[in-house]
Amino acid sequence: MSRGEKPIAISRMAAAVQPSATLAAGALARQLRAQGKTVFDFSLGEPDFPTPEHICAAAVKAMRDGHTHYTPAAGIPELRSAVARWYQKTYGITYSSEQVVISSGAKHSLHTALAALVGPGDEVIIPTPYWVSYSDIVQMTGASYTLVPTTFASGFKMNPGQLRSAITPRSKVLMLNSPSNPTGTVYTRGELEALADVILEHGLAVLSDEIYEKLVFGDARATCFATLRPGLADRTLTISGASKSYAMTGWRMGWTLGPAHIVKAMGNIQSQQTGNPCSISQYAALAAVEGDQECVERMRKEFEARRDLVCGRLSAMAGVRCPLPGGAFYAFFDVSAHFGRPLGGHKVTDSVSFCRAALEAAHVNLVPGSAFGAEGYVRLSYATSHEQLQGGLDHLEAWLRG
Ligand SMILES: *Cc1c(COP(=O)(O)O)cnc(C)c1O
């Protein structure tokens, strides 16, 4: 082949990026449905509720008012200060509007924050099970990552000793996610304080992904990590957004609060990257954070009822160990007792083959734990109706009974 005939190679970075495993699972379910098959799809990580009406109305008004042009790269001043006020009111922590940067979804916030903090030669510490995108986003910056496995017995929580042992001279950032996707684990204040002390001792930065802060159940309480110790806010980037709290996944609204010089660097990156987050979505997010929060509580209660239903039923199934998560909208359960068993003619040896067999034999779509760095487990998203949940769980139960 002459040089001119060779296909153009993609970059090393692009070749290393994996497509999101949860998005791929969702695509497979849609494909089967299109073929007329019944699928109970529990793979997707987004609220099934419509975006509340007053938020949609604010977007329509923004369009009519002519807010359809570029905005400042870090977001409109009104939204930046509204987010800062929200943190003051909710957690008693003071941020100026210069310490808030609005991005095109919290996933974009995570990437921009990491791009502002790390590059080749730096290490990022990630406790597992972790959200699928973390490792790929770190790789895109050229930095490397160290995984810290946690156990079922510890409630999937990393302890200070584990954190200390993972730190090397190259460690720069710890990524924390409480409430967690995929486990639903919520760290207590005391547990986070103990981690904060290690952070301060070693001078690390923290990316605290608090996107599920509004979705906590029973006695569980969300904690804003930056508030825990004096000086911690100087080394913490708090990341959250509108997607999960306000059922606004498609609007792409995320935010980061942190030290002014890092936030400014993130704004500069965005100015050369996306330009600015969507103007119309920013006015919608403004209505979300400034408006009545009753809609959030209504959705939270519904998620809690579904958690009780799903985890109750899963715990009663043969060979399943399911903890009761304190937050988010996922059940993350141990199915390793089924590995090596013939399940209705399917050979199941790991979480990937378990999920493939569950889809084919029980028409239930789950995400394998291996995608989250936790073999032996599977994730079920209960962000879907009671009817779907009951139907899918009936199928799963019958299949596992064998
Ligand atoms: C959904 C999710 C996000 C990001 O959501 P966006 O839609 O990009 O705002 C970030 N972190 C975790 C753990 C999530 O589950």
Image: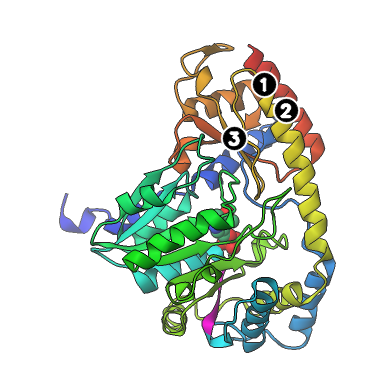
Q: CA distance from mark 1 to mark 2?
A: 7 Å
- Tell me if mark 3 has few (under 14), some (14-19) or many (20+) residues whose alpha carbon lies within 10 angstroms of its own: many
- Contact check, label 3 and label 1, Cβ < 8 Å: no
| SS assignment at label 1 | loop
Instruction: Give, as a three-letter code, the residue at label 3.
Output: Leu
Dot 2 alpha-carbon crowd within 10 angstroms: few under 14, some 14 to 19, many 20 or more? some
Provide the residue designation for mark 2: 313
Residue 15 visible in this rendered orientation of the protein: no
Tell me residue 287's x, y (percent): 76, 76
State which quadrant residue 272 falls in: bottom left
Chain-order first, disc 3 or disc 1: 1
In the drawing, what numbered circle is on residue 366?
A: 3
Please give left or right for residue 43 compared with residue 142 in the image: right
The residue under label 1 is 317
Taking the image as four quarters, which one is ligand 1 found in? bottom right
Determine whether label 1 and label 2 are within 8 Å by CB: yes
* Stretch in magenta: 99-105
| The one of 183 and 272 positioned closer to us in this rendering | 183
